Image (spheres, grey):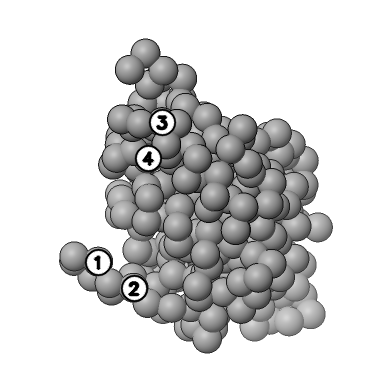
Amino acid sequence: MNVFEKYIKNLKLPEKLYHFTNSDGLLGISKNEEGKNKKENIGIWASHIRYLKDQKEFIFAFDIIKKILISKRKGKSLYLKPDIELQRAIALLLNDVDNDIEDIYIISFTQSKNEYNMWKQYTDLSPGYCLSFDPKILSDALSNFSYGYIASVVYDEKKQKELLDNVIEEAIAETENNNASNPNFDLSHNLYKKLLVIAPLLKSKEYKDENECRIVIQVNKENASIRKSNTAFLPYHNFEINRKVIDEITVGHCENFEYLRESLGFLASMYLPNVNSQKVIKAKIFCKE
C-alpha cells in the first residue's frame, strides 16, 4: 500500500453527502436512461478532470504540483538523474501526453446542505434540489472500477504540500530502489501516475465553504460518452449506483411546497426506494418564505 492509498484508507467517511441539482438533473439521475442496469441503479455523471465547469480548479492543482516539483528539482538531496525526469514529469502533467494512462473523472458532493451559495450556483433556485447520499453505498460502487476513491477535498495549503511531498519522496525512493535492477525504470511516469490521481483533491482555500467531497475514478475511453455545452464537447462517464443510495430530497425555493412534495413522492416511488414524501423536506434557509 503506497502513501496515498494509506492516506485514503485512514480517512473517515461522513455520515451523509449531498449533491445539488436542478429539476432536469434530478430526473436524469433518477431515470438513468443511459444505464447498463437502470432497473437497479441511478446514474450520475462523472466529469473529466480537464473539462470541469470551473477550469481554474485544474490549473490550480497542477500549478501547486509544478511548484513543488521545481523546488524538489533544485534541492541538493536529489541524485542527478531525477533532475531531468522531474522536468519530464512536469511536462507530462501539464500536457497529458501519456496516452497509456486512463482518464480521470470526478463527481462532486458536499458535506454542507444549507449554504445559500451552493443552492444559487448549482440549482438555479427554480426550485433546486439537494440530494442526500449514503457514503457507504457510494463507496461500494467503486468496486466496479480498476481505480477509484472517495475523499474530502484538501483546501489547506500546508496539508496539500505535506501530502504531495510524501508522494513525491516515495516516487523518488521507488526509482532509486528499482534502478538497481531495472535501469529503465522511469521516475517521470511513476510521478505522473501518482500525482494525476491526487490532483482532483486540491483546491484553493477560497472555496473551503463548499466543504467538498469527491469521487475520483479512472475510466478508459471505451466507457466514456460525450455531451455538448455552449462552448465545447465534454467527456463524461455515467456512474451507476444502487437506487437506495439516495435517502432524502431537500427542496429549495418553491411557491407550492406541498404540491411539489407530493409529486416528488410519486417520482421516488418509481425510482428511489429509500425516499418517500416524508423524506422530502424544505431547506432551512428557505423556511421563512
For marks 2 and 1, give the CA distance: 7 Å
Which circle, 2 or 4, is nearer the viewer?
Answer: 4
Quadrant location of the C terminus in the rendered image: top left
Verify CB contact (< 8 Å) between mark 4 and mark 1: no
Instruction: Identify the residue under disc 1.
Output: 229
| Whether residue 182 is situated above or below residue 257 in the rendered picture | below
Instruction: Tell me the kind of residue under disc 4.
Output: Gly
Q: Is mark 2 on a helix, strand or loop?
A: strand
Q: Does any portion of residue 87 appear in the rendered image?
A: no
For marks 2 and 3, give the CA distance: 32 Å
Instruction: Identify the residue under disc 4.
Output: 128
Dot placed on the residue nearer the N-terminal end, 2 or 4: 4
Which circle, 4 or 1, is nearer the viewer?
Answer: 4
For marks 3 and 4, give the CA distance: 12 Å
Which circle, 2 or 3, is nearer the viewer?
Answer: 3
Dot placed on the residue nearer the N-terminal end, 4 or 1: 4
Quadrant location of the N terminus in the rendered image: bottom right
Instruction: Tell me the kind of residue under disc 3.
Output: Phe
For marks 2 and 4, give the CA distance: 22 Å
Rendered image: mark on residue 257: 3
Q: Where is residue 127 in the image (x, y as percent from the top left)?
A: 34, 38
Instruction: Tell me the kind of residue under disc 2.
Output: Arg
Which circle, 3 or 4, is nearer the viewer?
Answer: 3
Instruction: Identify the residue under disc 2.
Output: 227
Verify CB contact (< 8 Å) between mark 2 and mark 4: no
